[in-house]
Image (spheres, rainbow, N blue to C red):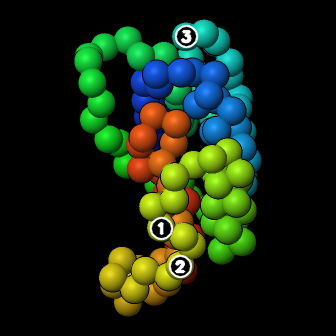
């Protein structure tokens, strides 16, 4: 993975933690470090994705976050977990041929939802 870690600020850390606990479990992620109320780190072998309370700025700027799913079924499980948490559906799980190049990515299967802060959160599986 090229990304070492990323962090987002959340208006309600508790609501976001409940959301990410559920959806990341579907794609093999889990809460690894909990420094509540300052920050929570998620990952598989180390904290790669962090959430924390709103600390800077006023207003909202949408962030797009894509989590790798190990299987197509994990994308479906991510979507089910997100909608069970009341997430707004942006796109239901489906293949996205426009995101394939025929060489590195031949199949791109993904679902997109909004987290409690309105960020665009995706789970994707690629072949």
Q: Quadrant of the C terminus?
A: bottom right
Quadrant location of residue 15? top right
Mark sitting on residue 94 = 2
Visible residue check, residue 78: no
Mark sitting on residue 38 = 3
Question: Percent from the top left, x then y, of residue 16?
Answer: 58, 31
Contact (Cβ within 8 Å) of mark 2 with mark 1: yes
Callout 3 secondary element:
loop
Question: Percent from the top left, x then y, of residue 64?
Answer: 37, 48
Q: Earlier in the sequence, mark 1 or mark 3?
A: 3
Q: Nearer the viewer, residue 1 or 56?
A: 56
Question: Percent from the top left, x then y, of residue 79?
Answer: 63, 61
Q: For label 3, count other residues whose C-alpha is less than 10 Å away and answer few (under 14), some (14-19) or many (20+).
A: few
* CA gap, disc 2 and disc 1: 8 Å
Q: Nearer the viewer, residue 38 or 116?
A: 116
Q: Is residue 30 above or below residue 101?
A: above
Q: Is residue 35 above or below residue 10?
A: above
Q: Nearer the viewer, residue 127 or 111?
A: 111
Q: Earlier in the sequence, mark 2 or mark 3?
A: 3
For this view, does 126 lie left or right of residue 84?
A: left
Residue at x-position 64% and y-position 51%: 82
Of badges 1 and 3, nearer the viewer stands 1
Q: For label 1, count other residues whose C-alpha is less than 10 Å away and answer few (under 14), some (14-19) or many (20+).
A: few
Q: Nearer the viewer, residue 33 or 51?
A: 51
Mark sitting on residue 91 = 1
């Amino acid at each position: 993975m090229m990304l070492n870690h990323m962090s987002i600020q959340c208006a309600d850390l508790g609501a976001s933690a409940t959301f990410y606990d559920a959806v990341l479990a579907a794609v093999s992620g889990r809460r690894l470090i909990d420094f509540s109320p300052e920050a929570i780190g998620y990952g598989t072998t180390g904290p790669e994705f962090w959430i924390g309370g709103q600390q800077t700025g006023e207003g909202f700027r949408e962030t797009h976050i894509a989590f790798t799913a190990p299987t197509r079924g994990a994308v479906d499980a991510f979507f089910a977990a997100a909608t069970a948490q009341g997430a707004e559906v942006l796109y239901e799980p489906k293949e996205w041929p426009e995101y394939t190049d025929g060489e590195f990515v031949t199949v791109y299967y993904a679902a997109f939802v909004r987290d409690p802060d309105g960020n665009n959160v995706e789970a994707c599986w690629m072949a």
